[in-house]
Image (spheres, grey):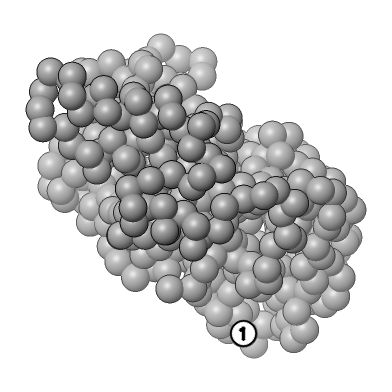
Amino acid sequence: MKLRNLILLAMVCLILLAGAFSGGFIAGRLFPTRQAALPPLELATPSTEQISAAAATAGTPEELQELFKPFWQAWNLVQKQYVEQPVDQEALMRGAIRGMLEALGDPHTTYLDPEEFKTLNTALQGEETYEGIGAWVDPSGDYLMIISPMPGSPAEKAGLRTGDKIIGINGEDMTGVDGEVVRKKVLGPAGTKVILTIAREGVEPFDVEITRASIKVPSIESRMLDDQIGYVRLFIFSDDAGKELREALKRLMAEKPVGLILDLRNNGGGYLDSAVEVASEFIAKGVIVYEEYGDGTRKPLEARKGGIATEIPLVVLVNEGSASASEIVAGAIQDLGRGKLVGVKTFGKGSVQMPSTLVNNQGAVRITIARWLTPDGRTIHETGLEPDVAIEITPEDLQANRDPQLDKAIELLKASQ
């Protein structure tokens, strides 16, 4: 399996996608791929061979033995004294890994058990359908938060919105419950029902009953609008997003549009490679994004040649659900003056995660290895991108099925003719 760097949506996650996970729940901030080696670390870290040899003898690398004495003492006490025996040693091992990564204080550096790791990969590769309510979520906060419902999903039909927090499930309070545990409780077989208690800004908490379904995660939709304006909406930066976008653009460009709208609203992220591919269809040359490492060094990722929509007038739609890879593309287009951003401030996920598979089929860890910056050197982590033209969608707009952000994008493109 190809090694991928995930720009994990802190919201998600996961991102997420995150991370991205099963049952139609995908952590919104998943991302990217890097094939190049990382800068060498200056720490005297035990080698894989040392650790493997130590594991084979049920020991700890010599230079870490003193440090890990309390850990093994606690492990042995649990084996001998815990009231319910025998203890599930595999669960303890996984819990130890989770706890170690949580101690870093970075919600994007996480452990994925084998099921989560498999689902994350298949979700981004677009290979499977999922059973659940159909929403991208962020499990990293106090409550599981909706990044965005998937188009046509039970979550969308039930009226769930970006920013909604799941504070209860089937009458059970989710206060203090880990986001991943909450996410798994929301999942379930198609046809079954779940009652979610939702906290939404400005209103009292309310219950909503949703019937789960089999959900195919969408990647892209495209069509010609009135006034000869092409429209492309990208839902996730999956493995095939760049290829699918190029095919859609070929069809649209054949109809000679006067302008294009790229809709990245509620797109929580995906692969970094896909973000560069997508941006390269609109940007002829220049840096798309920088990866900045802990020692201050920066690696530029530049536009790839051959984009087929690098000259046509362009507007990008963004909102609070646009995260990570979406922000990479939007930030590059904004910094390079390629087009205008219309909507509201984006989510603000600006770090890169490297997933590494663990031995013995025990899942994977994803570790934050870098932050990314826009071509002008801006960091958007926890701040987001401000649109060039700020337009909100009000509850009244939603009820009346109006889209003032899309209307504004059309207006700008018509004025540019």
Q: In this rendering, does residue 345 appear at all?
A: no
Quarter of the C terminus within the rendering: bottom right
The residue lying furthest to the top in this view is: 204
Where does residue 238 sit, x and y in percent of width and height?
50, 66
- Residue carrying label 1: 250
Where does residue 70 sit, x and y in percent of width and height?
42, 25
**Above or below, comparing residue 298 to residue 199 in the picture:** below
Question: Residue 317 vs residue 375: left or right?
Answer: left
Residue drawn 65% across the image and 35% down it: 392
Q: Amino acid at mark 1?
A: Lys
Displayed quadrant of residue 137: top left
Quick one: 97 or 107, which is closer to the camera? Answer: 97
Question: Residue 244 vs residue 180: left or right?
Answer: right
Q: In this rendering, does residue 202 appear at all?
A: yes
**Above or below, comparing residue 308 to residue 399 in the picture:** below
Count up the numbered dots.
Answer: 1
Quarter of the N terminus within the rendering: bottom left
Where does residue 191 sit, x and y in percent of width and height?
13, 47
Q: SS of the residue at dot 1?
A: helix
Mark 1 surroundings within 10 Å by alpha-carbon count, few (fewer than 14), some (14 through 19), many (20 or more): few
Quick one: 33 or 45, which is closer to the camera? Answer: 45
Where does residue 318 sit, x and y in percent of width and height?
66, 48
Residue drawn 10% across the image and 32% down it: 86
Residue drawn 54% across the image and 65% down it: 4
Residue drawn 18% across the image and 37% down it: 88
Quick one: 278 or 408, which is closer to the camera? Answer: 278
